[in-house]
Amino acid sequence: MLPINGNSGFTRSNRRVGDRPANNRSHRRLQHRHGRISIMIGPSSSEVETSLAAAVQNYLLAEPNDYISEDKNLRSVCSWLGRWLRDMLENTDGWGPYRSMDDVSPCTADRRSSTDLELRGLLIWMDDGTREWKEPLFARIHLSGNPSAPMECKVLVGDADRGLGKVSHGTAHDYPFVPVERWLFTFAVPRTCAQLG
C-alpha cells in the first residue's frame, strides 16, 4: 500500500535528488517494455488511500451530475487522486526534481459498478514554476470493502510516444478521444493490480 509522508521511510529533508528511499522495501521500481511501473508497498493502509477510497465511495453513491466539471464528489476524487499521484511521481525515475504535480482534471468518469470507477482525465503539472503542461491519465479504482486495504487501483500517466511536456495547459488535447497506446508511468496498489488491463 502507499505510505504517506510520515510513514514512507523517506526523510525528505535529508534526501538528495537521485537518492533511493531509505526503506527499499517500501518502494520498488520495475521496468517493462511499455514504460515504468512503480509499486508502493508498506503499511496496510494510508490516510491518503483511505481518503481517496472514501471519496470514490461518495461519488459512486451520489446522484450523477450532468456536468462533469461541476460534480463536487468527482472533484473530491480528483483532489485525493492528485495527492496520491504527487507522492508517487516525486519518487519515480523519469519524473525529475523540477516537475511538480498540480491537479487532476476529469474528462470522463464511468461508474462500472457500485465498487468500481474508471476515470479518464488530464494531469496538470508545472516544470520549473513558470510553465504548465498536461498529460493523459487513466485510473481504475476498485473499493475492496476491507478497512485495512480500502482500495485497489491502477493509474496510468503520460503518453510514452509523445513524451512529457508536449501539450501546454490551456491548449487543446486529443485525449481521451484519441487513446494512448503506450503509457509512461504505471502506478498500482496493491502490486497485483499492475497486471490488470
Image (spheres, rainbow, N blue to C red):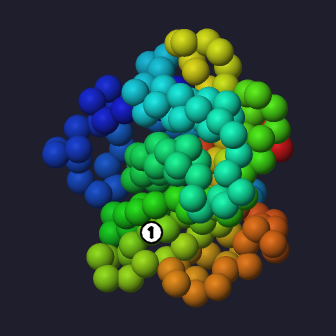
Q: Is residue 165 left or right of residue 106?
A: left
Going by the numbered disc 1, the residue's amino acid type is Trp
Q: Which residue is rendered at x = 71% and y = 45% of the image?
A: 64
Q: Quadrant of residue 138?
A: bottom right
Residue 17 pos. (x, y %)? 29, 57
Q: Quadrant of residue 21?
A: top left
User: Label 1: which residue?
Assistant: 125
Q: Which residue is rendered at x = 53% and y = 12% of the image?
A: 148
Residue 158 pos. (x, y %)? 63, 65
Which one is nearer the viewer's eye here, 185 or 81?
81
Residue 15 pos. (x, y %)? 23, 47
Which one is nearer the viewer's eye here, 93 or 142?
142
Report the residue that reaches farthest toward the left: 13
Residue 93 pos. (x, y %)? 48, 56
Mark 1 Cα-neighbour bin, 10 Å: few <14, some 14–19, many ≥20: many
Secondary structure, mark 1, is strand
Quarter of the C terminus within the rendering: top right
Residue 135 appearing in the image: yes
Q: Which residue is rendered at x = 81% and y = 32% of the image?
A: 113
Q: Which residue is rendered at x = 77% and y = 47% of the image?
A: 110
Which one is nearer the viewer's eye here, 67 or 157?
67
Report the residue that reaches farthest toward the bottom: 171
Q: How many marks?
A: 1
Residue 193 appearing in the image: no
Instruction: Indicate whether 27 appears above or below 29.
Output: above
